[in-house]
Amino acid sequence: MRGTLRAFLLSGTALATGVVLTALPAPAAAAPPGVPKGARKAIVLRIVDGDTIIARLTRGGPGVRVRFLGFDTPEAGRCWYRSSTERAAKLMPVGKRIYLLRDKDFKDHYGRRLFYAWNYNGVSVGRNMIRHGYARALLYRSNDRYIRAMRLQQARARQDRLRIWSGRCDRSANTVEPDSSR
């Protein structure tokens, strides 16, 4: 009888422990290597151009316009615009998770949210866009957390004469020739 009571109590304890364990939420998936601590998750809803997207920052929340810090891509109608926009779409496919990190300023003068971005694999979007010649390094006000790394990538892309640094214009769109004074 004692053995049966002990077995019953042990199984009840195990059952109660199991219920408690299953009631706890699963730990959040860790960000991939390369994503800095403090970065928040977001979902890409639409690529506007090479340096601006519409993203959902909170579950079920509305889409907000996000302007990336640290780099600037060609505007519509300029050389390399379409290529830089396509590169951004390849790095951050619609529907995929990205990671965003603020610096000193939260919004620009257009009301866009300002963030540095990493894609679902932990790749820095800004450094990748700059290194492969799709963008220029850009210091926006005092948001300078990664400007040295961005400028280093720009120097390498410029030395390798990649895309915007090539002196040529991509003919994938109706574009304006590059300004030779730069």
Image (tube, helix red, strand yellow):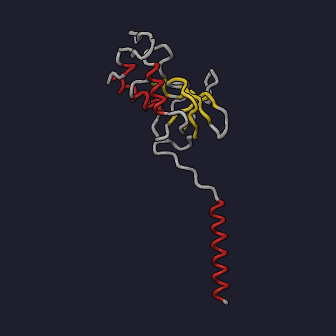
Q: Is residue 87 visible?
A: yes
Question: In which quadrant will I find the C terminus?
Answer: top left
Name the residue at the left extreme: 160
Which residue does the image show at 61% across and 29% down from the upper left?
Answer: 113
Which residue does the image show at 49% across and 40% down from the upper left?
Answer: 120
**Rendering coords of residue 131 (x, y %):** 39, 29
**Rendering coords of residue 128 (x, y %):** 42, 31
How many numbered marks does the figure carry? 0
Name the residue at the bottom extreme: 1
Q: Is residue 110 above or below residue 180?
A: below
Q: Is residue 93 above or below residue 141?
A: below
Report which quarter residue 45 is drawn in: top right
59 sits to left or right of 134: right
Q: Is residue 98 visible?
A: no
Which residue does the image show at 51% across and 25% down from the upper left?
Answer: 51
Which residue does the image show at 43% across and 18% down from the upper left?
Answer: 80
**Rendering coords of residue 66 (x, y %):** 58, 29
Question: In which quadrant will I find the N terminus?
Answer: bottom right
**Rendering coords of residue 74 (x, y %):** 47, 18
12 sits to left or right of 84: right
Quick one: 49 or 155, which is closer to the camera? 49
